[in-house]
Amino acid sequence: MKKILTLTSAIILSISALFAQNAVEKFTKDNFMGIGAQAGYSYQGATIGGHLDFNAGQVRGRFGIDTFFGPHFTIGTNIAFHYLFNLPVEGLSIYPIGGFNFEYCGAYTHPWHLGLDLGAGVEYDFGNGWAIFVDGKYDIRLAGHINSYRSYFGFTKAF
């Protein structure tokens, strides 16, 4: 699975370099903040959560909170940064992801997890501040239990 996520990230980043002629963050170019929800799957099991997005020029910061429903209930937070690269299709963008995550699961011998997230995603901006996205993250464990990967789909509404 690690190889697939790494290869997918490399392909997305390569394509973004080819098509990023006008790297303007369309979705939040006139908006400072967005809010949304996501669902997905991780090493821990199914996950649902919410997020806040903050726009600072061409870079988007995302603070999220997730709950994982697998063999053990886990709650986690993450902060990640994106840079949207617009593709030739109107409203379609890709982005690399870099950030940190922190989780708690009382069922493990080491209940806390701290990791570095690396990944990529695709977003489609419908206009009027509404967008949908899908992204995947590979986690480099810095401390605690293992949480190797997460993938999400979700929506965001910018204000």
Image: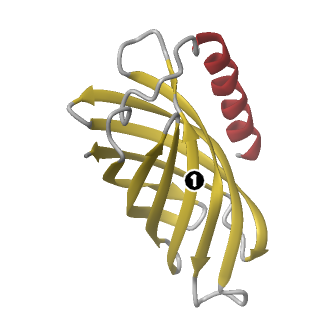
- Extreme-left residue of the structure: 128
**79 or 143, nearer to the observer:** 79
Q: In this rendering, is residue 60 above or below 36?
A: above
Amino acid at pointer 1: Ala
Q: Which residue is mark 1?
A: 80
Q: In the drawing, does residue 57 fall left or right of residue 29?
A: right
Crowd rating for badge 1 (residues with CA inside 10 Å; few <14, some 14–19, many 20+): many
Percent x, y of residue 11: 68, 24
**76 or 51, nearer to the observer:** 51
Q: In this rendering, is residue 101 above or below 31?
A: below
Tag count = 1
Q: In this rendering, is residue 136 above or below 23?
A: below
Q: Residue at x 58, y 48 (%)?
A: 81
Q: Residue 15: which quarter of the image?
A: top right
Q: In the drawing, does residue 77 fall left or right of residue 53?
A: right
**101 or 158, nearer to the observer:** 158
Q: Residue at x 66, y 82 (%)?
A: 112
Percent x, y of residue 98: 65, 48
**159 or 142, nearer to the observer:** 159
Q: Residue at x 48, y 24 (%)?
A: 24
Percent x, y of residue 10: 72, 29
Q: In the drawing, does residue 36 fall left or right of residue 118?
A: left
Q: Residue at x 53, y 77 (%)?
A: 71
Percent x, y of residue 105: 57, 83
Q: In the drawing, does residue 92 fall left or right of residue 109?
A: left
Tag 1, which secondary structure? Answer: strand
